[in-house]
Image: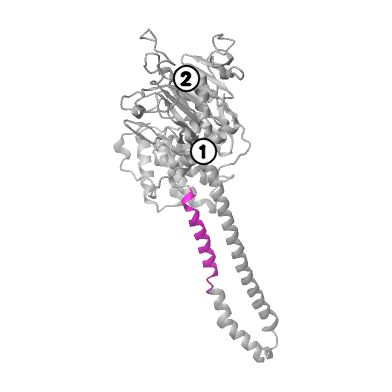
Amino acid sequence: MMYPTRVYLSWSLLAVAVIPVSLGEMYTSLLNVKQAIGVERKLIDYLRTYIDHESERLEDIKRFYAKVSDLHTELYQGPATAMANPLVAFSLIKRLHSEWLNVVHSNEALENTQALRSSYKEEEGDLPKLEDLQGAAKALMRLQDVYALQVASLVRGRFQRVTNGEPIDVYLPAVSVALSGDDCFLVGKVAYEQEDYYHSVQWLEESVRLFRGPGGEWGPENAGTLEDALDHLAFSHFKTGNVSYALSLSQELLHRDPMNGRVSQNVEKYEKLLLSSPPISIGVDGLRRPDSDHLRTRDTYERLCQTKGSQQPIQFENPRLFCDYFTNGNPQLLLLPVRREVLSLQPYVVLYHNFITDTEAEDIKRTSHPGLKRSVVAAGENQATAEYRISKSAWLKDSAHSTVGKLDHKISMLTGLNVKHPFGEHLQVVNYGIGGHYEPHFDHATSPSSPVFKLKTGNRVATFMIYLSSVEAGGSTAFIYANFSVPVVEKAAIFWWNLHRNGQGDADTLHAGCPVLIGDKWVANKWIHEHGQEFQHRCSLDPEE
C-alpha cells in the first residue's frame, strides 16, 4: 500500500555517516581487480612481519613472567632467611625499579603498530575507494536483476534462478565463496542509501538471517550489527508497503533497546497506519521490481542476455543464414580464407571465426594497459562516465604496436573498407569490470552535436568488434530490436553495418553488452566512418535503401 509523501517525509531516516567520496575506478576493470590481488599479497607480508615482531615481544614478556612467577613460587615462599641474602634483595629492588618499568612502558608494541600502519600507507593509493565498494555492490544487484538470480543462492556462492519453483544453476563456478552477514548488509545498505528498497529488502533479509545464526537467536557477537541491519530492514519494508512486518521488526528492536526514541516514534506511527488501513503482508518473493525510467527495452534486453544465444531461426530453418569460407575476392585471403558465419540479414551481422591469434590478442591487451581509463558515453557535445557503461578503455594508434596495423589491414581485407585514420577511428580496447556491461545503445551518432562528428568524416557506417578473450558466463552482445544475442567467441570478430545505404541510422542495430557474470572480457572496437568509402561502399540508387 502506498502512503502520501506527507505521511513519512518527517520521519527519522536512519543516520548514515557521511564519508568523503574519492573517485574509485578499480571496479570498472577486471585488470585492476586482478592487480589488487598483488596489493593484498603485500599487505599479508606486512601483517606477517607485524605478527612475527609481536610474537617476539610477547615471548619476551612470557619469559619475564615465568621468571618472576618461579621466584615467587620457589624462593619468596621459602624460609624468611632468603630475603636476608643481599643478592636476593638487590635483584628484587632492581626488578621492581627497572625491569617492570620496561615491560609496562615499552614502546615496542607501538613501534610494531606504527611500522604496520606505515607499510599500509605505502599501498593506500592502490587500495579500493568507497566508490569501488559501492560499484562492486551495485554489480551484484545488476547481475541479480539481468540474470534473474536468487539472492539466497548468491549468498551461498551459487548462481541460480528459480524456474517452476525450483532453483536451477545458471552457472557452476570453479571457485565459490559464500557471503557473510556483513557482506550482505553492505550490499543492502548501498541499495538503501539509493532509496532502492526492492534490493535493500532482499539483501538485508539475508544479512539478518546470517547475523541471527542457525537458531535465529540474538548472539552477543553480532548484536550491534544485527540491530543496525534490522533497523534498515524495518524501514525498507515500510517503504515497500509492508507496514505490518516493519512494525514487527521495530518492536523487536525496541524490546532490545527501549530507550531508542526514533524507533519508538516509528512504532507509534506504524501502529496508527495499521489502525487506519488493513495490513498488507508482502514476502520477499512478492516484491515487485520497479519499472525502469530510462531503459524501455529492459525486458527484451534481459531476456536476450539470459538466453545466451540466437533467438532467430538457425541455419537449417533459414537457408539464407549460412557459414562459409570467405575471401571477399581478396587475393591475400585465397590461400587462407576466413570462416564466416552470417548471423543476421537485417541488420546484416556476421561473425568471423579465428580472426585474431592468441599472440596478437595478448599484444593488444598488454599495449593497452597504460592507457586504460574509465569508459565514457556521449553527453551532448561532450563525453561523460555513466552507470550504464561499466568498463575501461584505451585508444591505440597504428604506431602503438605493429599488431595494430596488422589488424587494420585484416579488417580492410574482410570488409573492403578504408579503415585508415581518420576514415576509421583508432582501435579502442575495452576491459569490462565487475558485472561490466553496456546497456542498449547505438554505435552511430543519433545527434548532430555528437562527438562522433569531430573527425569530420561523417557518421560511423560500420562496427568491427574483436573478442580478445573468452568468458565463462555472461557478456553476450544482444541486438534488441533484431531479437538475437551473440555469446562471446574468443578470437572471433563480429561485423555489422550501422547505417542504411542512404546514410540513415539502422534502428535494428540497437545493441548491448550484457553484464559479465563470470570471466574477464576484453574486446577491441574499430569504428569505420562514411567518408573515404565512396568507392568501397557505394550509395544505392534507391533513396529509401
- Counting every numbered tag in the picture gives 2
Whether residue 246 is visible: no
**Mark 1, secondary structure of its residue:** helix
Instruction: Tell me the magenta residue range.
Output: 105-127
Q: What residue is drawn where x is 57% and y is 57%?
A: 47
How would you classify the magenta stretch by its main secondary structure?
helix
In the rendered view of the protein, which quadrant contains the C terminus?
A: top left
* Residue 470 colored in magenta in the image: no
Between tags 1 and 2, which lies in front?
Answer: 1
Whether residue 543 is visible: yes
**In the image: residue 283, left or right of residue 60:** left
Mark 1 or mark 2: whose residue is earlier in sequence: 1
**In the image: residue 35, left or right of residue 442:** right
With respect to residue 237, does 462 lie above or below? above
Q: Name the residue under label 1.
A: 367
Q: What residue is drawn where x is 39% and y is 10%?
A: 540
Residue type, numbered disc 2: Trp
Image spot of residue 279 (x, y percent): 41, 33
Estimate the spatial distance between the alpha carbons at disc 1 and disc 2, rounded to whole Å: 26 Å
Image spot of residue 367 (x, y percent): 51, 38
Q: Which residue lies furthest to the front in this view?
A: 331
Image spot of residue 460 (x, y percent): 40, 23
Q: Mark 2 points at which residue?
A: 496
Residue type, numbered disc 1: Thr
